[in-house]
Image (tube, rainbow, N blue to C red):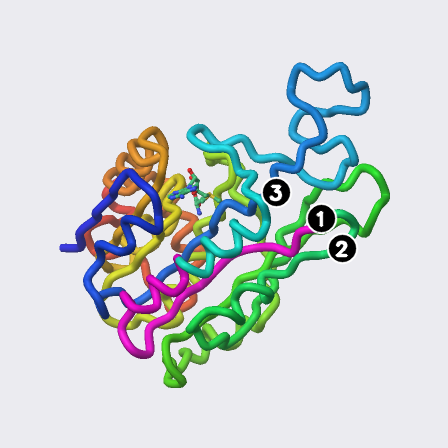
Amino acid sequence: MSTTTLKVGDAIELSKELEDNSINVTVTSPPYNKAKIGSPKNSLDKKYIPGVSSNGIFKKIEYDSFDDSLPEEEYQQKQIELLNIIHTKTVEGGSFFYNHKIRYNKGHSITPWEWLLKTKWHIREEIIWARGGGVEISGFRFIQNDERIYWLCKGPKHPKLPRACANLGSVWKFGADMKNDHPAPYPLRLPVRCVEAVLPSPGVVLDPYNGSGTTGVAAKLLGHNYIGFDLSENYLEKARDRITNISLHDLKKFRESSMLGNSGSGEVTLENFF
Ligand SMILES: C[S@@+](CC[C@H](N)C(=O)[O-])C[C@H]1O[C@@H](n2cnc3c(N)ncnc32)[C@H](O)[C@@H]1O
């Protein structure tokens, strides 16, 4: 039976406590550090639209326990530190799927390559997640309707992908999950694809930015142990419930997502619902 361990606290500090060489796969989406709003909510700035910057470029995400707005250099340093700690905690040949996006600041783009190249990870592939949607009300640029998923490997050896997974290609087209009330979740399809592609037998999956626990649901349904961290006790409580009591919605999404015909860990099946 798979286990789920959820801890409240800072991703960097909690990751340091993990055993070296104990994690098989990490899938995560950090906060993007894009709270470049022009004005506070009660602003008299007529151009201000809640959730969007006064220049219409950045969509602010309102998290419940922190403000997503570090100075960019500090943000990147912290990301590098976390990535390197998790590198030490990952088994040789293990993987890290790092979901991020290209951001814009003062008229130029900031790509995650800037800090990923400063980590110990081998960058195996950049996957484009064509997620649709997107906000860009000013005409400053073409609407950004993609995010990126960087497949990072520990060491030059890496798992050989099953043919059905490799055939997915490097542009993944699927939308967000509209039924999740967390402010910035990814859809279940994303961690299911990542974990299933590289972890054929039971192992340990980590998400240091657990959020609503989407990675945990994928890990559990694929039969792996899961470790998740988040600053927000509130998000973790909801995630605990979501992972413990897998919903019919998640199970259906999982079945649609699995490329290898996985139908659940055996502990949770569609038949449980009927
Ligand atoms: C983009 S969301 C992750 C969403 C998740 N992938 C999901 O599907 O629900 C980022 C999460 O990181 C958490 N967070 C932000 N800073 C953190 C930190 N320093 N340590 C741990 N968690 C943090 C936020 O509370 C938020 O839930």
Secondary element at tag 1: strand
Q: Position of residue 48 (x, y in %)?
A: 75, 24
At label 3, which amino acid type do we have? Lys
Report the residue marked by disc 2. 108
At 32% from the left edge and 38% from the top edge, which residue is drawn?
Answer: 239
**Most extreme residue toward the right, as rendered?**
139
Q: Is residue 84 above or below residue 10?
A: below
Report the residue marked by disc 3. 34
Q: Do the residues labelled 3 and 2 touch (CB within 8 Å)?
A: no
| Cα separation between marks 1 and 2 | 6 Å
Q: Is residue 177 left or right of residue 36?
A: left
Report the residue marked by disc 1. 105
Toward the viewer: 33 or 81? 81
| Cα separation between marks 3 and 2 | 14 Å
Q: Position of residue 83 (x, y in %)?
A: 41, 62
At label 2, which amino acid type do we have? His
Is residue 132 covered in magenta? no
How many C-alpha atoms fall within 10 Å of the one at disc 1: few (<14), some, or many (≥20)? few
Q: Position of residue 59 (x, y in %)?
A: 66, 37
Say which quadrant the C terminus sits in. top left
Q: Quadrant of ligand 1?
A: top left
Q: Are marks 1 and 2 in contact (CB under 8 Å)?
A: yes
Q: Is residue 272 above or below residue 112?
A: above
Secondary element at tag 3: loop
Question: Quarter of the image holding residue 100?
Answer: bottom right
Span shown in magenta: 82-104
